[in-house]
Image (cartoon, rainbow, N blue to C red):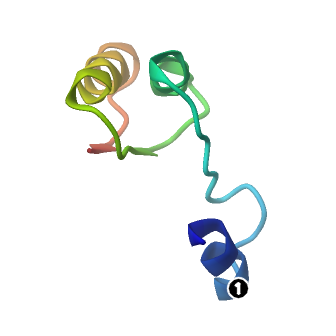
Amino acid sequence: MMGQLIIEAGFPPGVINIVPGFGETGASLSQHRLVDKISFTGSTEVGYIIMRNSHKHNLKPVTL
């Protein structure tokens, strides 16, 4: 539903990406240099991993 609303709002492709996955997915995204921001909904355990990795590697903003 969120993806459809993003398309309907007119965001260009690639500006907002919805990436489902488990802890490894969040860890990879939080460490990647080309990811500018992470907004995460999920477990506290994975939230800590994402926050720790994103600040350790390039201080990207994170919303948990």
Question: Which residue appears farthest toward the right when viewing the image?
Answer: 13
Residue at the image point whose x is 45% and y is 26% from the top: 30
The image quarter containing residue 1 is: bottom right
6 lies left or right of 47: right
Please tell me how many numbered marks the rendered image carries: 1
Instruction: Give the structural element (helix, strand or loop) at label 1.
Output: helix
- Please name the amino acid that badge 1 sits on: Glu
**Up-down relation of residue 41 to residue 1 (above or below):** above
Residue at the image point whose x is 78% and y is 63% from the top: 13
Residue at the image point whose x is 47% and y is 26% from the top: 26
The image quarter containing residue 42 is: top left
Q: Which residue is mark 1?
A: 8
Question: Which residue appears farthest toward the bottom when viewing the image?
Answer: 9
The image quarter containing residue 3 is: bottom right
Please state which of residues 19 and 10 is positioned toward the viewer in this rendering.
19
Please state which of residues 33 and 3 is positioned toward the viewer in this rendering.
3
Residue at the image point whose x is 59% and y is 39% from the top: 20
17 lies left or right of 27: right
Residue 32 percent coordinates (x, y): 56, 22
Residue 8 percent coordinates (x, y): 70, 85
